C-alpha cells in the first residue's frame, strides 16, 4: 500500500479569511478516504488546493511522491528580500548617474531631473511590490532591469571619460562600470525568476489544474459543472482529452494517427458511460439529463482521464436513499478498478458505508480523523455537528 | 531661482494643461467606475453620453439661442435622463444574462448612439460661435512667469472640483449613497435589506451620465470642437483612467483621470503628438496586463 | 432544453436554405449577371471568411475579440507591401499573411488571454486602435493617410485577374479552404477543448485542458484567417488606406456572427449572406450622409439580438445537437437500443 496523496501543513488564506489551517491528510493506494464537516468548513477549498485551482498559502501536497504545489520557501523569500534591497540601493546610485549623463546634454534639464525622481519613485514601488511577491512588480522590475542593461551596454560602448558625476569631480565612469557589471546578473536573475514556475503567471504559464489532471487526479464539483450544451458523449470525450495527443495539424489533415485517436476516444467514452450506466443517453444533450444522471455523467467524465485518484465533491447530494445506494455501489466499483477515492459527503449513511478512513474539518481545521466507528463516537465531532450524529446512527 | 522658473515653465504649463484635461477625464471616468461598481459592466455607451452632452449644449446655444450658462445648466439633467433611459432599455433587461451578452449590448448601444449623432448633426466639426462665450474665458487668469492659466481652465477646474466634492458628499453622507455602496458590495444582501436595487442603479446611471455630459460640455468649450466620434476616443481614455485608478473605486477614477491627463499632455508635448491617443491605449493595456486592480482598486474573485 | 428529437430541429429550414444558396453560388457568374452583383457577392463571401475567422474566438472559446480588424489590416498591408516591393505571387502572399497574422495573434494573445472577458475585450480594442494609429503615422512604411494605390492584381498561371468573376471564383475557393479548415477543427480534439472552454472554463481545466494554450491557438488561427482575408482584399480592391480598418469594421463582423449565431458555422455564413447585401441595399436607398451612419443599423441589430434572440439565427446548441444526432446514426447500433 503505497502513499498516493500526502498533504502536509496545508494552509490557505484569502486576505484576512483563513479557509484552511495546517491540514495533514493522507490517501493510500486503494483507499476510500472521506472528508466531512459542517458547511463552510473548507472542504471544497481543500479540493481546489489539491487540483491547483487555488495556490496554497503554506504547506505542501505530494502526489505519488512528487510535489504538485509550488511552495514559497522561507529561504527564497529572504533571499529575494535581500536582493531587492540591494537592487534598490544600486538604483539610488543609478539616478545621479542618469542625471550626470543627460542633464548637461539635453534641452529639457528640468524635465530630465523630474524623470530621474520619477524613476526613483517607481523603484521604491517595486521594492514594496516585490516584497509581497506581486506579479506586476516582477514585470516592471524586469522592464527596468532590461533598461538598465541597455543603458549599461551603451555606457560601456561610449565611455564618457570627461563626464563627472553631477556636482562633483568624480568621473562618472567610476559608478558606470560597476553598475554595468551588476545589472547583468540582476537581469539574468529576474529573467530566470520570470521563467521559473511561480512567476510565470504573468504570461499564464503555471502549474495549473490541467497538469494535475495529466498527473492522474480528476474531480467532480459540488455544483455540477458539465458542458451543458454538448452531448453526453462529447462531455466524456472531453474528459479523455488529456490522454490524447492530436493537435492543430492532426485536426486539419485528418492523419491516420488522428483518426485512430478519435476512434479510441469514442470507445473509451462509451466504456465510461457504460460503467456509470448512462450509455443509453450517450447522444442526449447534457443539459437535458435528470439530476442524478448528471451527477453520474460528471463521474464518467472524471473517469475518462484514467486517473489514479478521483476527488468526489458531494456526489450523493440531493439524492433519495435508493439513488444514494446506487451511488455507493458505483463508488465501490470505482475502487475495485484500482482508482482511489477522496470523497466529501454530508450524507452520513453513504460515508459510513464507503470510507476506510474519515477526516473531519471544522472552520478550516482538522478536528478529528480515524475509522468511521472512531469518528462516530468522537466527542469533538459530535460537538461540531450537534444533532447530526443521531441521524448517522 | 529665476533660472529654475524659466527652465520649468514648459513643464509647469504642460502640468496645468494636463491637470485640466485630467479633471475632465476624471469626470468621465467616475461615471464608468460607478456603473461598474454597481452592475459589474463596462458601459461602453458612456462616452456617447459625453458626446451628446457636448452636442446638446451646442445645439441649445446655436439653435435655441439660449445663453451659454443656461444651456450648460440644462444639459446636466437631460444627460442624467438619457443615462437612465439607456439603462432601462439596454441594460436592465439583461441584468441576469451572461456577461458576454451585456457587453455586446453595450457596444451595440455605443455604435448606435454615435451614428445617431452622425445622422442628426452631420460629421462636420462644430464650434461655438465667437460671440456666444463670455470674452473673459480666453483671457489668462493667473500668470507665473511664462506659465498662464486661463479663466476657462479655472472654470473647468472649479467645476470639476465642485463635482468631486458633491459626489463625495452624495456617496458618503446621503442614504442613497450608502445604498449605492451597499449594492456595489453585494447586490443580493442589499435587496434583502430593503434597498430597491433597480432604483439605485438608475440613480447611479443618472449621476454618472450627468457628470459625463458635463464633461462633454466642458471639453466642447475647451477645444471648441464638437463632432460625433469625440465620445469614442474620450470614452476609451476615461476607461483607461478608471482602470488605472482601480475600477470600482471613485477616488481611483479621480486619481487615474489626473494621472492620465497629465501623462497624455506630457507625452504629446515631449514625445510625439501623433501618438497622443496611443499613449492612453498603451497605459490602459499596461495597467490591465500588469496591475489589473489599478492603483487603488480591489480584486474580485470567482467562487468555484 | 429538450431531449434530442429530430422533428424539433426548427432550424432545418434555415440550414437547408443556406445549403441551397451555397450550392447555387458557383453557378452565378455563368449567367449574365452584372459585375455589380458579383462585387456584392464577393464582398459578402469575403465577410463570410472574416466572420468564420472571428467566430472561432467568441464562438468557440467564449471570449469577445474587439480588435479583429487589426489583423485584417495587418494582412492587407502585408499583402500590399509585399506585392509592391517584392512582386510576390498571391499564393506565396496568402500563407505569409496568414503566418504574420498568426504571429501577431500569438504575441497579443499570450499576455492577454488570461484576463477576464471585459478586460480582454478592451485590450483587443486597444490593440486594433494602436494598429490603425501605426498604419496612419508610419509614413515610411505605409504611406499613411495617402494610402497604397496601384496594388497589382494577382495572377494565376500567368494570367492576371481582371474580370470580376475571376475574383469571385478566387474568393469562393478561399472560402472553401477556410470552411474546410474550420469544420475540421470544430470536429476534433481541439474543437472539443474549445467548446469545453466556452461552456465552463474551470471544469475544462480540471479535465486537463490548458486554457492559455488553447485560447492562444484559437486566437492565432482567428488572426491568421483575418489576415488572409485582408491579403485578398488588398489585391482585389487594389487600394488600401488606414481608414478602411477602423474599429467599426470589427463591429460589423461581430454583428454578422451575433446575428447568425455565435459558434455555429452555418449561422455565421448565413449572417454574412443576409447582412452584407443589406448594407448594399442601404447604400441604394439612403442618401449619402445617412449611409455613412449605416453602422447605426448594426449597433441596433446587436442590441436587438441580445435582447430577443441571443443565440442567433442558427444557435450553437442546435449545431451541437445536430452533430450528436449524426454521431448517433453512425454508431447507433453499437449501443443496442434507440435513444428517444
Image (tube, helix red, strand yellow):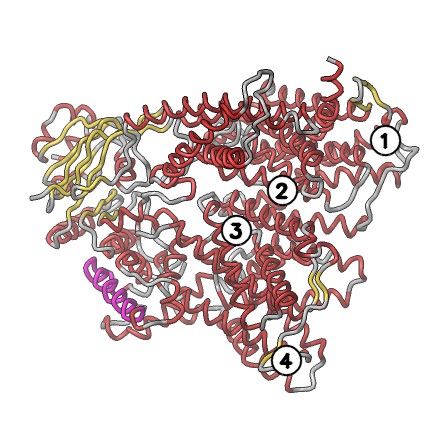
State the residue at coordinates (67%, 35%): B267
C-alpha separation, residue under disc 1 versus residue under disc 4? 60 Å
* Residue at the right extreme, as displayed: B131
B13 shown above or below B103: above
Mark 1 vs mark 4, foreground winner is 4
Mark 4 vs mark 3, foreground winner is 4
C163 shown above or below B227: below
In the rendered structure, which disc, 2 or 1, sits on the residue that comes first in sequence? 1
State the residue at coordinates (37%, 45%): A205
- Say which residue label 4 marks: C166
Which chain hosts label 4? C
- Say which residue label 1 marks: B68
- Give the overall secondary structure of the magenta segment: helix
Q: In the figure, residue A246 lies in which quadrant?
A: bottom left
Say whether residue C229 is magenta: no
In this rendering, position of residue A354 left or right of residue C277: left
C239 shown above or below B201: below
Q: Residues within 10 Å of mark 3 (few under 14, many from 20)?
A: many
Chain part drawn in magenta: A258-279
Where residue C206 appears, as percent x and y from the top left, is 31, 48
Which chain hosts label 1? B
Which chain hosts label 2? B
- Say which residue label 2 marks: B88
Quarter holding the C terminus of chain B is top left
Where residue B204 appears, as percent x and y from the top left, is 61, 32
State the residue at coordinates (63%, 48%): C129
Give the camera-side residue of A268 and A102: A102
Instruction: Name the disc covering residue C64, or none.
Output: 3
Q: Secondary structure at mark 4?
A: helix
Mark 2 vs mark 3, foreground winner is 3
Amino acid at each position: 500500500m503505497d502513499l498516493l496523496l500526502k498533504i502536509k501543513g496545508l494552509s490557505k488564506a484569502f486576505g484576512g479569511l483563513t479557509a484552511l489551517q495546517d491540514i495533514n491528510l493522507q490517501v493510500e493506494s486503494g483507499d476510500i478516504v472521506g472528508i466531512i464537516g459542517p458547511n463552510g468548513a473548507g472542504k471544497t477549498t481543500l479540493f481546489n488546493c489539491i487540483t491547483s485551482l487555488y495556490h496554497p498559502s503554506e504547506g505542501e501536497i505530494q502526489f505519488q511522491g512528487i510535489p504538485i504545489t509550488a511552495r514559497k520557501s522561507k529561504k527564497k523569500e529572504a533571499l529575494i528580500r535581500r536582493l531587492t534591497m540591494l537592487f534598490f540601493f544600486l538604483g539610488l546610485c543609478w539616478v545621479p548617474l542618469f542625471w550626470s549623463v543627460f542633464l548637461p546634454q539635453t534641452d529639457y534639464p528640468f524635465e530630465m531631473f523630474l524623470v530621474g525622481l520619477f524613476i526613483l519613485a517607481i523603484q521604491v514601488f517595486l521594492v514594496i511590490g516585490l516584497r509581497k511577491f506581486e506579479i506586476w512588480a516582477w514585470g516592471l522590475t524586469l522592464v527596468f532591469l532590461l533598461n538598465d542593461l541597455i543603458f549599461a551596454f551603451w555606457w560601456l560602448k561610449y565611455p564618457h571619460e570627461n563626464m563627472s558625476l553631477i556636482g562633483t569631480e568624480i568621473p562618472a565612469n567610476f559608478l558606470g562600470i560597476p553598475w554595468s557589471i551588476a545589472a547583468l546578473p540582476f537581469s539574468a536573475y529576474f529573467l530566470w525568476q520570470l521563467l521559473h514556475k511561480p512567476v510565470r503567471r504573468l504570461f499564464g504559464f503555471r502549474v495549473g489544474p490541467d497538469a494535475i489532471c495529466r498527473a492522474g487526479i480528476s474531480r467532480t464539483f459540488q455544483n455540477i459543472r458539465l458542458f451543458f450544451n454538448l452531448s453526453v458523449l462529447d462531455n466524456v470525450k472531453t474528459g479523455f482529452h488529456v490522454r490524447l495527443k492530436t493537435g492543430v495539424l492532426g485536426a486539419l489533415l485528418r492523419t491516420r494517427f488522428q483518426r485512430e485517436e478519435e476512434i479510441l476516444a469514442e470507445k473509451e467514452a462509451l466504456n465510461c458511460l457504460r460503467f456509470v450506466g448512462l450509455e443509453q443517453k450517450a447522444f442526449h444533450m447534457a443539459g437535458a439529463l435528470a439530476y442524478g444522471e448528471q451527477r453520474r455523467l460528471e463521474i464518467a467524465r472524471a473517469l475518462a482521464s484514467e486517473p489514479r485518484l478521483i476527488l468526489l465533491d458531494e456526489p450523493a447530494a440531493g439524492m433519495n436513499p435508493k439513488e444514494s445506494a446506487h451511488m455507493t455501489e458505483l463508488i465501490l466499483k470505482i475502487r475495485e478498478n484500482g482508482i482511489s477515492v477522496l470523497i466529501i459527503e454530508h450524507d452520513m449513511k453513504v460515508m459510513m458505508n464507503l470510507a476506510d478512513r474519515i477526516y473531519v474539518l471544522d472552520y478550516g481545521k482538522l478536528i478529528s480523523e480515524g475509522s468511521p466507528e472512531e469518528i462516530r463516537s468522537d466527542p469533538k465531532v459530535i460537538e461540531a455537528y450537534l444533532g447530526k450524529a443521531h441521524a448517522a446512527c | 531661482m529665476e533660472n529654475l522658473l524659466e527652465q520649468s515653465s514648459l513643464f509647469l504649463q504642460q502640468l496645468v494643461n494636463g491637470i485640466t484635461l485630467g479633471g475632465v477625464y476624471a469626470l468621465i471616468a467616475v461615471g464608468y467606475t460607478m456603473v461598474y461598481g454597481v452592475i459589474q459592466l463596462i458601459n461602453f455607451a458612456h462616452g456617447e453620453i459625453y458626446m451628446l452632452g457636448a452636442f446638446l449644449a451646442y445645439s441649445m446655444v446655436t439653435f435655441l439661442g439660449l445663453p451659454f450658462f443656461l444651456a450648460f445648466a440644462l444639459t446636466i439633467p437631460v444627460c442624467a435622463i438619457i443615462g437612465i433611459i439607456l439603462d432601462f432599455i439596454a441594460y436592465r433587461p439583461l441584468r441576469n444574462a451572461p456577461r458576454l451578452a451585456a457587453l455586446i449590448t453595450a457596444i451595440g448601444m455605443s455604435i448606435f448612439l454615435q451614428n445617431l449623432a452622425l445622422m442628426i448633426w452631420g460629421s462636420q466639426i462644430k464650434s461655438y460661435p465667437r460671440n456666444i462665450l463670455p470674452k473673459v474665458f480666453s483671457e489668462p487668469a493667473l500668470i507665473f512667469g511664462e506659465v498662464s492659466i486661463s479663466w476657462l481652465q479655472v472654470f473647468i477646474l472649479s467645476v470639476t472640483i465642485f463635482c468631486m466634492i458633491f459626489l463625495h458628499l452624495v456617496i458618503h453622507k446621503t442614504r442613497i449613497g450608502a445604498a449605492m455602496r451597499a449594492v456595489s458590495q453585494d447586490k443580493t444582501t442589499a435587496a434583502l435589506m430593503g434597498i430597491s436595487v433597480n432604483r439605485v442603479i438608475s440613480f447611479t446611471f443618472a449621476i454618472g451620465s450627468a457628470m459625463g455630459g458635463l464633461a462633454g460640455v466642458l471639453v466642447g468649450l475647451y477645444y471648441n470642437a464638437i463632432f460625433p466620434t469625440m465620445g469614442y476616443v474620450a470614452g476609451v481614455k476615461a476607461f483607461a483612467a478608471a482602470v488605472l485608478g482601480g475600477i470600482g473605486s471613485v477616488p481611483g477614477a479621480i486619481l487615474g483621470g489626473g494621472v492620465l491627463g497629465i501623462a497624455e499632455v506630457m507625452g504629446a508635448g515631449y514625445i510625439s503628438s501623433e501618438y497622443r491617443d496611443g499613449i492612453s491605449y498603451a497605459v490602459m493595456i499596461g495597467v490591465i496586463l500588469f496591475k489589473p486592480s489599478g492603483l487603488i482598486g480591489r480584486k474580485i474573485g470567482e467562487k468555484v | 432544453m429538450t431531449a434530442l428529437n429530430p422533428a424539433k430541429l426548427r432550424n432545418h429550414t434555415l440550414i437547408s436554405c443556406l445549403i441551397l444558396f451555397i450550392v447555387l453560388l458557383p453557378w452565378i457568374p455563368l449567367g449574365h449577371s452584372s459585375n455589380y452583383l458579383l462585387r456584392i457577392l464577393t464582398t459578402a463571401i469575403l465577410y463570410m471568411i472574416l466572420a468564420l475567422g472571428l467566430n472561432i474566438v467568441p464562438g468557440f472559446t467564449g471570449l469577445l475579440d474587439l480588435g479583429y480588424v487589426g489583423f485584417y489590416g495587418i494582412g492587407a498591408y502585408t499583402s500590399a507591401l509585399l506585392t509592391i516591393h517584392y512582386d510576390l505571387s498571391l499564393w506565396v502572399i496568402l500563407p505569409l499573411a496568414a503566418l504574420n497574422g498568426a504571429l501577431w495573434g500569438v504575441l497579443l494573445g499570450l499576455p492577454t488571454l488570461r484576463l477576464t472577458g471585459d478586460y480582454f475585450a478592451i485590450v483587443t480594442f486597444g490593440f486594433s486602435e494602436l494598429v490603425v494609429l501605426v498604419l496612419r503615422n508610419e509614413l515610411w512604411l505605409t504611406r499613411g493617410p495617402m494610402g497604397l494605390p496601384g496594388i497589382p492584381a494577382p495572377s494565376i498561371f500567368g494570367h492576371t485577374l481582371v474580370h470580376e468573376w475571376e475574383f469571385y471564383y478566387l474568393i469562393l475557393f478561399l472560402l472553401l479552404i477556410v470552411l474546410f479548415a474550420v469544420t475540421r477543427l470544430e470536429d476534433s480534439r481541439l474543437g472539443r477543448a474549445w467548446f469545453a472552454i466556452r461552456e465552463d472554463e474551470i471544469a475544462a481545466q480540471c479535465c486537463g485542458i490548458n486554457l492559455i494554450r488553447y485560447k492562444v491557438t484559437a486566437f492565432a488561427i482567428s488572426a491568421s484567417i483575418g489576415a488572409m482575408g485582408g491579403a485578398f482584399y488588398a489585391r482585389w480592391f487594389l487600394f488600401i488606406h488606414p481608414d478602411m480598418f477602423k474599429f467599426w469594421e470589427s463591429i460589423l463582423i461581430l454583428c454578422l456572427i451575433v446575428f447568425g449565431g455565435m459558434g455555429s458555422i452555418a449561422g455565421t455564413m448565413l449572417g454574412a449572406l443576409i447582412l452584407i447585401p443589406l448594407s448594399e441595399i442601404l447604400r441604394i436607398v439612403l442618401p449619402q450622409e445617412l449611409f455613412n451612419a449605416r453602422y447605426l443599423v448594426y449597433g441596433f441589430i446587436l442590441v436587438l439580438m441580445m435582447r430577443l434572440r441571443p443565440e442567433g439565427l442558427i444557435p450553437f446548441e442546435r449545431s451541437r445537437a445536430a452533430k450528436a444526432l449524426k454521431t448517433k446514426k453512425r454508431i447507433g447500433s453499437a449501443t443496442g437500443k434507440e435513444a428517444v
